[in-house]
Amino acid sequence: MDLILSNAKIVTMVPGETGYQVSEPKFIGIKNGKIEAISNHPLHVSFGLHEIDCSGVLLTPGLIDCHTHLIYAGNRSHEFEMRQQGATYQEIARQGGGILSTVNATREATEEELVRLALPRLDGLIHSGVTTVEIKSGYGLTLNDELKMLRAARMLAQERSIHIETTLLAAHAVPPEYKDRPDDYIDYICTTIIPAVARQQLASAVDVFCESIGFSLEQTEKVFQCAQTHGLAVKGHTEQLSNLGGTALTARYQGLSADHIEYLDQAGVQAMAKSNTVATLLPGAFYFLKETQHPPVELLREHQVSMAIATDCNPGTSPFSDLTLMMNMACTQFGLTPEEALRGVTSHAAQALGLQHQKGQIQTGMDADITLWNISHPAELSYEAGIPRVAGRVVNGKFTTGNASPSLSKFSTTSSDGK
Ligand code: NIG
Ligand code: FE
């Protein structure tokens, strides 16, 4: 063993009846980044081993933010002012603002600047208990700028203790140089950007913004076909502002997730159920755009579609870097229970990234990604927001302290070689 977590009360989130219950104190043995053993009895502490006494804290799987646009330059507070004076998100986009204004700022920035600008946002997520973050490109829209964004996203893992998953979102908006030629831009994505990203292994999935102000069903399908040819998974920004059928299309391509989905209908929900596509709910964007159309949560439950929750952290529709705040919003706005909310940022979020066999549960054989909280019941995570309550995180088997310094006195970290 490399690390032992002793006297640990665990909320495992292993599917089944007891996953959300707080366990009796247990002993977790961690080796080579994996959970090697979970025992009711103290584990043998050998020479050089680190042991952390977890009395007084609660352990959950490390939270997973499965949909973010964390890498970008500039901000859009001026557009927020415009929207407060009556302009809509779509109007601003059609006038060349919106996503394209962030594209201009992001193209100007160097890779190092993008990393530096993203760190405060990443720190916000880390302070809300996150151990895995998915990050999309989509503000570059040229081969070099998309590659730059994806490399910057990957660089974050050198700067912080975090697992990063990257997604190519070149089909986010039509760039100015392809104005009125969206099909030519789709060809450029398929012939140039996707092959290069696949070759350099800079993303594991490809996403498309399928919407009237994004790309049509036909264009989305071309990108999906190309992605699959190159061995990349697909996912979609679908049914966010209208019902185009992008979710059913995503499901037809065995998409990992369809995200937003406020305007999804029953046929779309049935298609998701058939393909095991996760419904990723983004309550921050719903709230910030003052949407009134709710995602079909009752239908999703009825058809047993897994629901994930993410921040969608981005400068236009969801400038929020706190995943537990999103859990709260998913409960208050969409009617999820705190248990569904926690599943949405653990096991279901892992599924939305195709990582359900490695992450999102505290179970033997899974990656050792665990968050230690100063709480006594998991519902507190959805109930309160803004309180620094992360006592520590284990990422890939390595323990780091949280930002809630008073809690540190609760831990006695022992090491028989004195480290
Ligand atoms: O997930 N809907 C498209 N993409 C983002 C918004 C991007 C932006 O406005 O900068 C979203 O909401
Ligand atoms: Fe998004």
Image: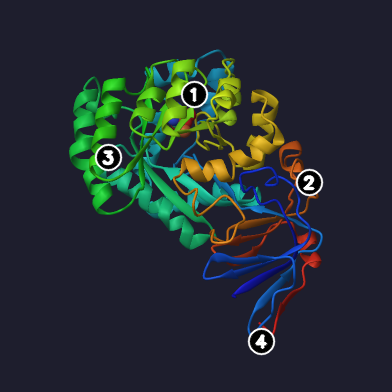
Q: Earlier in the sequence, mark 4 or mark 1?
A: 1
Q: Is residue 118 above or below residue 291?
A: below
- Is disc 4 in contact with disc 1, using a CB cutoff of under 8 Å? no
Helix, strand or loop at disc 4? loop
- Is disc 3 in contact with disc 2, using a CB cutoff of under 8 Å? no
For the N terminus, which image quadrant?
bottom right
Question: Which disc is residue 228 wearing?
Answer: 3
Distance between mark 3 and mark 2 Cα atoms: 42 Å
Residue 315 % position (x, y): 50, 34
Helix, strand or loop at disc 1? loop
Helix, strand or loop at disc 2? loop
Q: Is residue 177 left or right of residue 135?
A: left
The residue indicated by pointer 4 is 417
Tell which tag, 3 or 4, sits nearer the viewer: 3
Identified by mark 3, the residue type is: Gln
Identified by mark 4, the residue type is: Asp
Q: Earlier in the sequence, mark 3 or mark 2?
A: 3
Helix, strand or loop at disc 3? helix
Q: Which residue is rendered at x = 47% and y = 58% of the image?
A: 157
Question: Which disc is residue 377 wearing?
Answer: 2
For the C terminus, which image quadrant?
bottom right
